[in-house]
Amino acid sequence: MPTTTKPTFWQRTGVQSWFLKKEISYTETASITPDSVYKYIIEKFRESIAELSFADRIIFYHEYIICFSPPDYNKFMDNNRGIFSLIIKESVKAFYSILQEYRQKGKKVIASSNKWAFRFVSHPDYEKGDKGFIGKLLPGNVIRKEENLRVTFIPRQTGIAQTFDIADEILKDFTYYSDGYYEMPWQDTLETSDVSDVSRPRYFARLDATVPEKEYVGKKIEYLVKDEAFLISGSDEKPNQPGIFRVPSEWVSSPHLSVRYDKTADKFYIASFGEKTLVNENEVTKSYPGSPAWTLLPMNSRIVLNGIVSINIFKV
C-alpha cells in the first residue's frame, strides 16, 4: 500500500509554489538582529494602520506574531535573551510616537484592546532566513471558523513580502515558547509608563479562562496574579474571595488547582485536586489534601480541566 505524506503548512495554505521553490544557488542571508526585528515590527505596525484605518479613524493591530525558522529563533533568543523585552518596549514607544502624529492631525486613534501582545514563534516548514508576520486586532481573541487571519511571509530566496489569508486553525502548527511572549498595557495618553514605578500594582502573571457555559460564550474570564499562592475553584466558591480565581463552570472542582509562585526561581507550580488536569496536553498527577504533588507550570502554558475548561497563563 503506498504511503501518504502529510501535507506541509505551505501546501495546506496553497502557496507552496510561491514561497518554497528550491533554487540551484542560494546565498546565505544575514543573521536576524535586534535592530532588524525592531524595524520589522514598526513596518508591520505602519502597514496595519494603512490597511485597517478609514475615514478619520486610525485602527491598528494589537497582537504581533513574528515567525522564524526554528534555527533562527533559537539563535536569536540564545544571543539576545535579555533584549527581547527591550525590543518590545521600544517598539511600543515608537507605536505611540506614530499615533501621536495622527492625533495631532485631528485623527481619532481607536484602540481595539486594552493591551499590546507580542509573540516570537517558529514553524518547522520555515527554513533559515524565512520570516513571517501574523497580526490580530484583539490579542488572544476567539475567532469564528469562517474568519481568516492575514499572514505576511518573506521567503529567503526573494526577500519580497507576500500577504495572504489563512484559517485560524493553522496557528496550531506553530511552535510557541514561554520566553517568546510579552505584553504591555494600552495607554490612552499614547505614552509609555515607567514600569518601575513602585506605586503601580505588581502582578506575577495573568490567567484567562474559557468555559462552555452559555452566558460566557466568546468571552474570557481574567485573573491577575498578585499572590505567591492561590487557588483555582469552580462555581461552588463564593465570588471575590482573596487568593482564589473563581472559574464559573460546573466542570471545575472547588478547589480544582492550587498554584504557587517561586519568586526566587521565577517559576510557577500547580497541584491538581480535581478530576482531570492537563498542562500542555500532559496529564498532571492527582493530589490529595495535605499531600500536594507539585508540577512545573511554564509561562504560556495551556491548562485543560476535565477536557472542557481551558486556562492560559501569561507574563504581565
Image: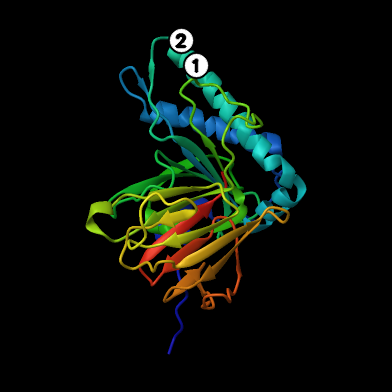
Q: Where does the C terminus fall, quadrant-wise? A: top right
Q: Residue at x 59, y 60 (%)?
A: 260
Task: Kindly identify which residue carries mark 2.
Answer: 104
Q: Is residue 191 above or below residue 299?
A: above
* Count of labels in the image: 2
Relative depth, front residue between 315 and 76:
315
Amino acid on which disc 2 is placed: Gln
Q: Can the viewer see residue 247?
A: yes
Please, what secondary structure does the residue beneath circle 1 have? helix
Q: Is residue 115 above or below residue 70?
A: above
Q: How did the renderer colour the structure?
A: rainbow
231 left or right, relative to 265: left
> Is residue 25 visible from the viewing direction of this image?
no
Quadrant containing the N terminus is: bottom left
Residue 236 coordinates in the image, percent (x, y): 33, 63
Locate residue 105, reporting x and y percent: 43, 9
Q: Is residue 275 left or right of residue 265?
A: left
Residue at (33%, 59%) from the top-left corner? 211
Above-or-below relation of 162 to 53: below
At x 59%, y 75%, the residue is 293
Q: Which residue is mark 1?
A: 100
Q: Pointers 2 and 1 in contact (CB under 8 A)? A: yes
In the current view of this chain or complex, which residue is farthest to the left?
214
| Front in this rendered view, residue 4 or 55 | 55
From the viewer's perspective, tell me whether residue 239 is left or right of residue 202: left
Horizontal and vertical percent for residue 144?
29, 52
Residue placed furthest toward the bottom = 1
Query: What type is the residue that disc 1 sits on?
Result: Gln
Q: Residues within 10 Å of mark 2 (few under 14, many from 20)?
A: few
